[in-house]
Each structure stands twice: as C-alpha cells, then as structure tokens.
Image (cartoon, grey):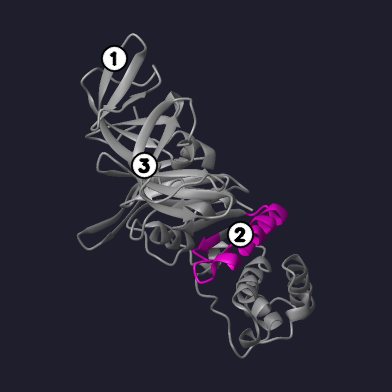
C-alpha cells in the first residue's frame, strides 16, 4: 500500500488546457472517488497517475517517490477499466495470473495468488471457464481479480461498472467495497455516477473543467456544498434551484421568490437585504407538513418509485421536484403544498454561485 500525492498537475493538448494545476493528497489505504460530468478531466487525471498519459507539468508521488518518469509497471499500480480486457482464449485462472507470468513469478506462487484472489471474489468455481462463458458481472470480477493478484500499491478504477445493468451495478458496488475493506489498498475510483461515489468512497473529489470544485466526505459535500455546481451534482434527485431576493424583518432574513413566496433562511447566512440570490432546495426536504415555509405548486408529473413518489411541481413557472411518501395520494393537475425548514434552504450568490 502507498499514499498518492499530486502536486500542481497540468495537462495540455497543444493550446488546449485539460487539467489546471491540480493538487491532491490521498492517504495510504484511502478510497477516493473522482466525479464530474463527461469531459471534466477525471479519466485523464487517472491515466496520468497510472503513467498512461504524459504529464505536462507538476509531479505525481506514489509512496513518497516521484514517478513521473516511471512506466505503468514500474509504478506498481493495478488498473481496472470500463472494458474487461480479458483474453478470450485463456481461462479465468490464466487471465488472472498472466501479468504474474510475464513478471517471471514461479508457477506455485502464481497458483497460490490466483487461488487467494478467487476465494476473495467468489471465482473459485469459475477458474477453468473462458470469458465467453461468464456473465458481465463475473467478467468484471475476473478483471478485479487480475488486479488483486499483483498486490499493487494502488488500485485505479476507470468507470468499471458503466457497462453493467442497474441490478449488477448495485451488486458490484458492494463487492468493490468488500474488497477494499479486506485488502485496504489505496484506491482511486473514477465515475460519473454520484451514487457510486457516495456509497463507495471515503472522500469524493468533484471535478469541473479540469479543476477541483470541492473535496470531502460524501456527507460533507451533500450537506455543505461549496457552490452551485457541487450542490447540483451531489444528491439524487438533483437539488432544485430558484431565484429570489433577500428581505429582512423582525423574524430574521428571508428570501422572496418570484411568485411572492417567502422562505425563511438561517441567520448565519452571509446575506444583506436587497441582495439577489439563488436558493437550493433538496427534493427530499420538501415534504407535506405544517412546519417550515410553505411552497405551493401545480403537479405536472407523478413518478411512483415504491416507498417514495417523485412529484414535479410548477412553482411560478419554475419546475420543482419533491420526494413524498409513496402512500400519499397525489395526482397530476392537483395543487400540492410542501414545507421547507430554514436550515434546509441553501443560499448561493447569484453571480458567482458561491455558497453564502
């Protein structure tokens, strides 16, 4: 195992800047998720750590040593890709042990490590099968097993679950988490799926256009987003965003929405009367109740999901999603009033998007 440190990493393709001066420290044994929209640079950053992409500027440290000039093999990392990249003519056991064979490891050592990894990933009964005889989830486990047998200092995952169906993704998330708990190897995981990131990672790094917007634990990013971008990216369904103007009265600061609705906000918000702001409301915090500031809207769409129902409201021409109890009787075209407490109203500067 080893720590990973990025110091002022940059990547350019000609005149195009892709990664802008990123610095990040990953502790020994930590599981980090890099998230962000397509094209934000997360896979490029991972490939630079792996040595598959040349670094334009800055340094990558693994285990305290600069590895900029080292090949991927010399960095002692193992990478699990979106595609399984298994050799179709080899058995599961041969695929898992192939890199060890190339490294000149003795056959008994290879067999021992393959057997250990197979037990860890529940692949023992599949060792003599070929990839064509495996399901998608089994192939991904084999790809993970091939990485495990090398006893790497760092695991790098590049969207490994994106080719799987929804049910398999949930299963494989649990298996990756279990694997990390067993081996405790430093892991860096790239995904565009924020649910994956929140369920797997010790810490999430949110990237946007080649820059780090915020990093922290999943709950830190969910409860205290630094700006509108992070607030909108973390959380499912996505945070509702509305515009308003700050007002003050004897009861403390409030935000007046376009339809006249007045929402109380916490006194510690850094706002002043007359200030134009953007507020964020999480759908799961908008519940039919007597408490908090009321918001009313016409129901545009009802999406039952079982225990909960997602309701899309028209609030003064703006669409607002609320998550309500699945037993609540709601219907399209009806009026629904939901309440939101002051401590659940996020406030952002209208121009910069910075949290206030």
Provide the secondary structure element on which disc 2 rests: helix
Query: Which comes sooner in the sequence, label 3 or label 1?
Result: 3
Q: Which of marks 2 and 1 is in front?
A: 1
Along the viewing direction, whichever of 76 and 188 lies nearer the viewer: 188
Mark 3 neighbour class, 10 Å CA radius: few under 14, some 14 to 19, many 20 or more: some
Along the viewing direction, whichever of 143 and 250 lies nearer the viewer: 250
Picture coordinates of residue 178 (x, y %)? 69, 56
Tag of residue 173:
2
Question: Is there CB contact under 8 Å for labels 2 and 3?
Answer: no
- The picture quadrant where one finds residue 280 is top left
Compared with 201, 152 (above or below) is below
Picture coordinates of residue 273 (x, y %)? 24, 17
Mark 1 neighbour class, 10 Å CA radius: few under 14, some 14 to 19, many 20 or more: some
Name the residue located 39 percent from the left edge and 43 percent from the top edge: 239
Compared with 184, 268 (above or below) is above
Picture coordinates of residue 258 (x, y %)? 23, 32
Q: Mark 1 points at which residue?
A: 248
Query: Which comes sooner in the sequence, label 2 or label 3?
Result: 2
Q: Can residue 140 be seen in this view?
A: yes
Tag of residue 240:
3
Name the residue located 55 percent from the left edge and 76 percent from the top edge: 84
Which portion, as a residue range, is magenta?
156-185
Query: Which comes sooner in the sequence, label 2 or label 1?
Result: 2
Name the residue located 66 percent from the left edge and 67 percent from the top edge: 150
Picture coordinates of residue 34 (x, y %)? 46, 52
Classify residue 227 as left or right of residue 35.
left
- The picture quadrant where one finds residue 141 is bottom right
Asked if the stretch drawn in magenta spans residue 155, the answer is: no
- Work out how far the residue at label 3 is from the one at label 1, CA to CA, in angstroms: 23 Å
Main SS, magenta region, reads helix
Compared with 203, 137 (above or below) is below
């Amino acid at each position: 195992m080893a720590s990973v440190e990025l110091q002022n990493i940059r990547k350019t393709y000609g005149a195009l800047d892709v990664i802008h001066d990123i610095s990040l420290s990953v502790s020994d044994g930590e599981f980090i998720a890099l998230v962000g929209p397509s094209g934000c640079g997360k896979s490029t950053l991972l490939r630079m750590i792996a040595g598959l992409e040349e670094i334009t500027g800055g340094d990558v440290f693994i285990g305290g040593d600069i590895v900029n000039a080292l090949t991927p093999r010399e960095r002692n990392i193992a990478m699990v890709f979106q595609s399984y990249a298994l050799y179709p003519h080899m058995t599961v056991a041969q695929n898992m042990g192939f890199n060890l064979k190339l490294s000149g490891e003795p056959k008994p050592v290879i067999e021992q490590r393959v057997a250990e990894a197979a037990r860890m990933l529940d692949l023992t009964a599949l060792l003599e099968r070929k990839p064509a005889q495996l399901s998608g989830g089994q192939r991904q486990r084999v790809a993970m097993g091939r990485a495990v047998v090398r006893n790497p200092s760092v695991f790098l995952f590049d969207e490994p679950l994106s080719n799987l169906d929804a049910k398999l993704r949930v299963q494989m998330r649990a298996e990756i988490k279990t694997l990390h708990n067993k081996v405790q190897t430093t892991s860096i995981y790239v995904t565009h799926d924020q649910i994956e990131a929140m369920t797997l990672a010790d810490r999430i790094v949110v990237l946007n256009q080649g820059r780090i917007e915020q990093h922290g634990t999943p709950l830190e990013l969910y409860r205290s987003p630094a700006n509108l971008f992070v607030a909108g990216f973390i959380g499912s369904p996505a945070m509702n965003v509305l515009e308003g103007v700050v007002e003050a009265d004897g009861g403390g600061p409030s935000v007046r929405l376009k339809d006249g609705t007045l929402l109380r906000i916490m006194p510690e918000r850094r706002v002043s009367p007359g200030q134009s702001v953007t507020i964020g409301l999480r759908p799961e915090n908008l519940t039919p109740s007597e408490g908090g500031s009321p918001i009313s809207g016409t129901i545009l769409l009802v999406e039952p999901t079982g225990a909960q129902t997602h309701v899309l409201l028209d609030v003064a021409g703006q669409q607002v999603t609320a998550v309500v109890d699945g037993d609540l009787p709601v219907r399209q075209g009806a009026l629904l009033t939901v309440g939101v407490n002051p401590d659940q109203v996020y406030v952002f500067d209208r121009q910069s998007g910075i949290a206030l």
